[in-house]
C-alpha cells in the first residue's frame, strides 16, 4: 500500500513537473460504454444538466464543490427524478460501495470494468445492494438516482465519472460512452464552458476538455475569466 | 484602449480566416427517412388546427461555411443580422468580440472589451477592474457605473431600463431567495421589484413586463408569471410545475418553456409549451429539442432525435397553430455541435457550430412565411 502510494506520488510529481495538465485519455477503438439509463432522454425521464470539463457551473464553484478535481466538473451530470433506475455502463465487477472519499453522496458505487477503467455513479438515493467483486453486466440496474441535497426537490441527478484504475484520474465520458452527445445537448445544460480570455478558444467544446488529476492544483482559476466570477453574467 | 469599433477589413487571420468559397455539404450521409413527425397539440385553442404537413418548402434551404474549423463557439448576431459575432483572438490581434460580415466575410473588431451587448448593440455591459458593473456606449465611448454591485444586468427591449438579481447562495435550489431590482439605463432610480423563492428573473417581455419564475412570500407553489412593474400586478402562466429552457419571443407576446421532471412525479403536464403572455392560448408541443424564436410568433425547434444522421429544423407558428418542417435532414443535412446555434434577428437564417468540422456555418431558410403559404 505504501509502495503504491509512493509510486503514485512519484508519478504525480513527475507529471506536475512536466506539464500542468494531464493529457486526455481515450480508449482504443470505439467508445466501449453505454449511457447509464435504459430510457431515452426527455422531460419525463432524464437529460444532461452539466457536461464534463471546464463548465461555467464548475468555475463558479471551483474551490467549493470541485476543488479536489482541479476545479473542473470531473463527470457528467444527468438530471433525473429521485428513484430513476441507473444501469451499468459496461461489464465489470463492483469495486466499491459507498466510498465517501470519492464524494458524490449520499451514496455512490464504483465498477471496475474489464478494460481497466472505472465508472463511478454518484448521488444515488439508496445504498446499492452489492458486495465488492460482484459481477455486473452492461445495462444491469445498479441503483437509483438521488439528490445531493437530500430533498429530491433541489437538484436530483446522477453524477457519472470515468476514472483510471488508480482512481487518481478522471477522463471525459464523451470519449468513453457511445452516445449522440450533440443531440443530447439540444435539451441539455443552460450554460456553456468557462473561458480564459488569455486563451479564449481553449476547452470550449464537448471533446476538447482536459483530464482531471485529483488533488492537483486548479486548472480554471483564470485571471481573465469570461463570464466574470459574479452572478448574472 | 480604443473603444469604438475598429474595422479590420482585409485582415489576414490564421485562427479565424475567411474560408474558401462556400462548399456544399461534404459527404452527405446516406439518410434514413425522418422519424415520426412532431405535431403541435393546442391545449386551449381551436382543435381544428391543421396538422403538420411535410410539404416541401418553396425555398430550398442553403448551407454555407462561414469560418474556418476551430475558429469560435457561441456565436451571436448583430442586431441588423448582417454580422455573426463571437469572442476570438485572431493571429497577431487582441482578444475581443469580433464580427464577420455574412456577405463580404470581412472580420471586424466590435469591442476589445469583452462584455454583454444590449439588444440594440449600442451598449456594452462589462465588469471593470474594480469589480463594478460598467455600461459603455460604443458610439460615444461614454461610460457609467450601475448599482448592481458587480452583477450582470438584463436590458429591457426598449433600452429604457436594466434589471439584476441578488440571490442567496446556500440551501436547496428550490429554497433560495432572489430579489429582483431595476433602474433606468443610467443606473438611477434603482428599486426593488419583487422577491421570489426558488427561481428568479427570466427576462424582459417588453419595457414594463418581466417574466419571472418562483413563489412570492406566502405562496405554496412556484409559478411562471408575467409581472407588470408599473402596476405591481402579475399574471400566472403555469403553477406548481418545474420549468426550464425558457425563451421569450421578440415583442414579448409569446414564451416557450419546458416542464420537466416534477419532483412529485406528476408527468401530466411535462413537455414543451408555448404560451401567450396576454391571456391568449397555450399550446403543448409534441416534441423535445432545442427551441429559439424566429420572429414575434414563430418558434424554431431542432428536435432531439437520438442517432438520426442529421438534425432537422421544425417551425411552430403560435399565431396560427401551424407547424412546418423547414429542413428535412435529407436535402439539407447538418448537425449542430453542443447546441451552438442562433437565429438571425431577420429570421431568414441561422448560424450554427457544425459538428462535422467545428466551423461556423450559415443555414439560409428563405423568407419568413413562405413555407406556411405553401401548405
Ligand atoms: Zn456532477
Image (tube, rainbow, N blue to C red):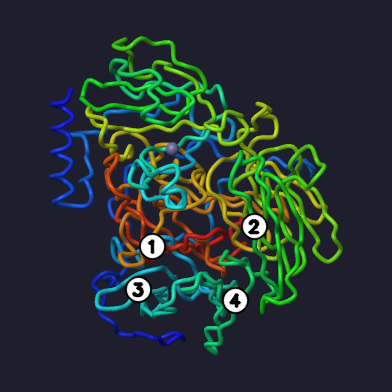
Q: Residue at x 14, y 50 (%)?
A: A17
**Mark 3 chain:** B
Mark 3 within 8 Å of ligand 1, using the beta carbon? no
Residue on which disc 4 sits: B120
Callouts 1 and 2 close, C-beta under 8 Å: no
Circle 3 sits on which residue?
B95
Coordinates of residue A56 in the picture (x, y in percent): 45, 52
Q: Which of marks 1 and 4 is nearer the N terminus?
A: 4
Residue denoted by label 1: B361
**CA distance for labels 1 and 3:** 22 Å
Instruction: Residue under label 2, please give it.
Output: B166
Residue A26 is left or right of residue A181, and the answer is left
Q: Mark 2 lies on which chain?
A: B
Q: Which of A4 and A29 is in front in this view?
A: A4
Q: Which residue is drawn at 53% across and 54% down?
A: B326
Mark 1 vs mark 2, CA separation in Å: 38 Å
Mark 1 and mark 4: Cα distance apart in space? 24 Å
| Number of marks present in the image shown | 4
Q: How crowded is mark 4: few (under 14 residues within 10 Å), some or many (20 or more)?
A: few
Amino acid at each position: 500500500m505504501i509502495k503504491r502510494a509512493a509510486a503514485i506520488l512519484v508519478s504525480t510529481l513527475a507529471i506536475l513537473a512536466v506539464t500542468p495538465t494531464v493529457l486526455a485519455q481515450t480508449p482504443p477503438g470505439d467508445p466501449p460504454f453505454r449511457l447509464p439509463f435504459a430510457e431515452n432522454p426527455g422531460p419525463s425521464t432524464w437529460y444532461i444538466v452539466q457536461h464534463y470539463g471546464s463548465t461555467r457551473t464548475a468555475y463558479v464553484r471551483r474551490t467549493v464543490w470541485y476543488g479536489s478535481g482541479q476545479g473542473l466538473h470531473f463527470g457528467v451530470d444527468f438530471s433525473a427524478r429521485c428513484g430513476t433506475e441507473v444501469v451499468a455502463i459496461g461489464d465489470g465487477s463492483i469495486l466499491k460501495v459507498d466510498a465517501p472519499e470519492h464524494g458524490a453522496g449520499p451514496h455512490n458505487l464504483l465498477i471496475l470494468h474489464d478494460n481497466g477503467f472505472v465508472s463511478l455513479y454518484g448521488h444515488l438515493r439508496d445504498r446499492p445492494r452489492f458486495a465488492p467483486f460482484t459481477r455486473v453486466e452492461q445495462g444491469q440496474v445498479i441503483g437509483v438516482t438521488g439528490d445531493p441535497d437530500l430533498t429530491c426537490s433541489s437538484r436530483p441527478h446522477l453524477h457519472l465519472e470515468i476514472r483510471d484504475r488508480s482512481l487518481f484520474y478522471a477522463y471525459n465520458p464523451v470519449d468513453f460512452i457511445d452516445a449522440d452527445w450533440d443531440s443530447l445537448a439540444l435539451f441539455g445544460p443552460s450554460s456553456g464552458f468557462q473561458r480564459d480570455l488569455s486563451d479564449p478558444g481553449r476547452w470550449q467544446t464537448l471533446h476538447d476538455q482536459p483530464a482531471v488529476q485529483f488533488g492537483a492544483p486548479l486548472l480554471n482559476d483564470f485571471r481573465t475569466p469570461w463570464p466574470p466570477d459574479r452572478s448574472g453574467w | 484602449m480604443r473603444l469604438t469599433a475598429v474595422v479590420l477589413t482585409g485582415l489576414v487571420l490564421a485562427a479565424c480566416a475567411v474560408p474558401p468559397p462556400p462548399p456544399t455539404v461534404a459527404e452527405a450521409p446516406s439518410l434514413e427517412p425522418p422519424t415520426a413527425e412532431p405535431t403541435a397539440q393546442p391545449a386551449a385553442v381551436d382543435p381544428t388546427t391543421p396538422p403538420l404537413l411535410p410539404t416541401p418548402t418553396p425555398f430550398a434551404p442553403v448551407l454555407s461555411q462561414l469560418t474556418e474549423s476551430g475558429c469560435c463557439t457561441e456565436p451571436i448576431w448583430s442586431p441588423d443580422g448582417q454580422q455573426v459575432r463571437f469572442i476570438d483572438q485572431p493571429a497577431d490581434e487582441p482578444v475581443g468580440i469580433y464580427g464577420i460580415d455574412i456577405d463580404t466575410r470581412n472580420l471586424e473588431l466590435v469591442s476589445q472589451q469583452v462584455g454583454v451587448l444590449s439588444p440594440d448593440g449600442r451598449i456594452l455591459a462589462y465588469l471593470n477592474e474594480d469589480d463594478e458593473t460598467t455600461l459603455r456606449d460604443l458610439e460615444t465611448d461614454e461610460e457609467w457605473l450601475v448599482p448592481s454591485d458587480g452583477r450582470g444586468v438584463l436590458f429591457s427591449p426598449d433600452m429604457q431600463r436594466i434589471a439584476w438579481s441578488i440571490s442567496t447562495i446556500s440551501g436547496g435550489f428550490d429554497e433560495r431567495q432572489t430579489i429582483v431590482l431595476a433602474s433606468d439605463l443610467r443606473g438611477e432610480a434603482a428599486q426593488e421589484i419583487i422577491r421570489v423563492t426558488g427561481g428568479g428573473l427570466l427576462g424582459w417581455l417588453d419595457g414594463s413586463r418581466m417574466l419571472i419564475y418562483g413563489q412570492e412570500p406566502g405562496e405554496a407553489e412556484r409559478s411562471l408569471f408575467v409581472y407588470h412593474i408599473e402596476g405591481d400586478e402579475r399574471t400566472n402562466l403555469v403553477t406548481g410545475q418545474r420549468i426550464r429552457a425558457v425563451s421569450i419571443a421578440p415583442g414579448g407576446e409569446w414564451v416557450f418553456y419546458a416542464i420537466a421532471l416534477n419532483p412529485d412525479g406528476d408527468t401530466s403536464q411535462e413537455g414543451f409549451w408555448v404560451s401567450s403572455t396576454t391571456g391568449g392560448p397555450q399550446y403543448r408541443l409534441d416534441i423535445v429539442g432545442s427551441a429559439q424564436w424566429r420572429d414575434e410568433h414563430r418558434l424554431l425547434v431542432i428536435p432531439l432525435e437520438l442517432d438520426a444522421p442529421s438534425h432537422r429544423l421544425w417551425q411552430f407558428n403560435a399565431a396560427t397553430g401551424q407547424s412546418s418542417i423547414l429542413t428535412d435532414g435529407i436535402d439539407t443535412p447538418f448537425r449542430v455541435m453542443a447546441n451552438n446555434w442562433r437565429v438571425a434577428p431577420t429570421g431568414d437564417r441561422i448560424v450554427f457550430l457544425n459538428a462535422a468540422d467545428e466551423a461556423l456555418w450559415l443555414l439560409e431558410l428563405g423568407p419568413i412565411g413562405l413555407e406556411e403559404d405553401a401548405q
